[in-house]
Image (spheres, rainbow, N blue to C red):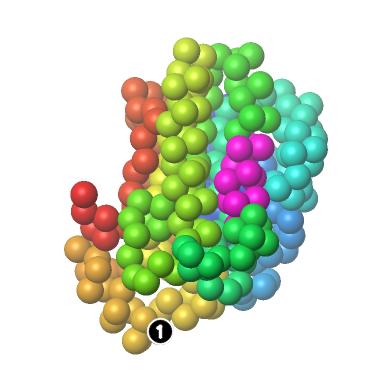
Amino acid sequence: MKLDGKVALVTGSGRGLGRAYALHLAKIGADVVINDIDLDAAKQYDEALTAPTVMDEIRNLGRRSIGIVADVTSKSQVDQMVEQIVDEFGRLDILVNNAGGAIVPGPSYASSVAEDHFRKMLDINLMGTIFCCQAASAPMKKQRSGKIVNVGSQAGLRSVGDGNGTSYGVAKAAIQHYTRKLASELGPYNINVNCIAPAWILSSRAIAGGRDKPETRERLLKEIALGRLGQPEDCAKVVEFLTTDLSDYVTGQIISICGGVCLF
């Protein structure tokens, strides 16, 4: 129980990768706050829960949990969420900035992406991450301890194809560099700030979008040195490393969880 007595906030954890992170942290002792704009988000992709809600799943593991509906693109909602957590639990030790994704529909070519598309993608990914980091930094500074894990993407590490996917790739690249800047600022407070960059992971949303279809799987496997698509637990294990004492001397790093897609 490496995280016994610790309090974690995982954004976008009503389903998918966020839920995997939340459950994994609970299994190693953390009390976990579930945040989403829809706490029943798992139903959207027919993701089976072991209890009525993710909060109930965590309580069934013997840990405390509450759910908070908040839009991370709203600074005021994020600030209120962190205040509620500190009021209820007395502290905040871990932040996993999972909310976001390539969820704005339509193409985004570098030379022609519409302003509205770019701004929405930046808000959902970059600004949501910044707002949460800023809000969580305050109690962590007072404690003089904390672990922050931002979620980037292989799309922010490399550019492939014909220039499409620019909005998402640039937003994730910005998160990755913001991680480095924040790490250098918060290091003196004993706060570690790192970032994971997943690649082809079989989340419920990715499966619903066709990632596990034979033709897609065949195409993607050609990119992956380990010869398999990733599972949410592959990412959750790295989150464990970055939120426990195993990573006490690691900060400002971008860890690619890609099976060997990003080999540089």
Identify which amino acid the numbered label 1 is placed on.
Lys
Magenta stretch: includes residue 5:
no
Q: Which residue is mark 1?
A: 213
Point out the residue furthest to the bottom here: 215
Residue 257 vertical position relative to residue 187 in the rendered view, above or below:
below
Q: Is residue 165 above or below residue 194?
A: below
Q: Quadrant of residue 159?
A: bottom left
Give above or below for 71 relative to 134: below
Q: Crowding near pointer 1: few (<14 within 10 Å), some, many (20+)? A: few
Horizontal arrangement in the rendering, residue 86 relative to residue 250 (left or right) = right
The residue nearer to you, when weighing 17 against 26, is 17
Q: Residue at the front extreme?
A: 111
Q: Magenta part of the protein: which range? A: 121-132
Visible residue check, residue 51: no
Q: Nearer the viewer, residue 134 or 228?
A: 134
Question: 56 or 92, which is in the foreground?
Answer: 92
Spot occupied by residue 69 in the image (x, y as percentages of width and height): 77, 50
Tell me which secondary structure the magenta stretch mostly adopts.
helix
